[in-house]
Amino acid sequence: LLLNSLPKDYVWHNLQVELFLNFSWRNFNAFGSPNFTMLVAIKNVMQNSAHLNRSYIALFVDKLFDEFPLQMCERKVRYISYQILDFLLDKYCSELSEKVDFVSYFTSSISGERDPRCLVLIFRLICIICDHFNSEL
């Protein structure tokens, strides 16, 4: 609720981002699977922060793709997850390329996807990954 009352263009300071993301990671799976509302908040914070620490990018990928089978989540959770990944690949591609398991996490997460909204994002992400992650393919 508090995050929704902030202006859409609110610029987060590094300490605020760090505190919020630490809180988010601790409560990420409070309901047994990724929480949609939490993911929306994470997306907004990530998009409005000046720069994300590499450790938070790696932690997001680990939490989302390693700890939870994304295909077992609701469609809206998968969709927002792919939107966050789209943002991260656009702004932090070099940081993601350092993550050794990223391509395998991504390919396993898209296996069996049938939702058209997710598929459109996935095809875009595949193009970006093929352009920037040639050595892992």
Image (cartoon, grey):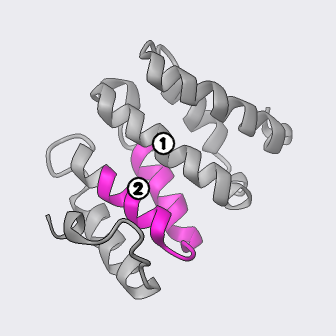
Give the main secondary structure, helix, strand or loop, of the magenta stretch. Answer: helix
Q: Residues within 10 Å of mark 2 (few under 14, many from 20)?
A: some
How many numbered discs? 2
Specify whether 127 is left or right of 135. left
Where, quadrant-wise, is the C terminus in this rendering?
top right
Q: Are marks 1 and 2 in contact (CB under 8 Å)?
A: yes
The picture places residue 11, in percent across and down from the top left corner, at: 44, 78
What residue is drawn where x is 38% and y is 32%? 78
Q: Is residue 35 visible?
A: no
The picture places residue 118, in percent across and down from the top left corner, at: 47, 25
Amino acid on which the number 1 mark rests in the picture: Gln
Specify whether 27 is left or right of 86. left
Is 109 situated above or below 82?
Answer: above
Any mark on residue 11, and which?
A: none
Task: Examine the image and state in which quarter residue 45 appears.
Answer: bottom left
What residue is drawn where x is 39% and y is 40%? 80
**Which stretch is magenta?**
40-65
What residue is drawn where x is 23% and y is 40%? 33
Q: Is residue 78 visible?
A: yes
Residue 56 magenta-drawn?
A: yes
Specify whether 9 is left or right of 133. left
Amino acid on which the number 2 mark rests in the picture: Lys
What residue is drawn where x is 79% and y is 42%? 133
Task: Assign a secondary structure to mark 2.
Answer: helix
Task: Examine the image and state in which quarter residue 105 appears.
Answer: top right
**Residue bearing the label numbered 1:** 83
**Residue bearing the label numbered 2:** 43
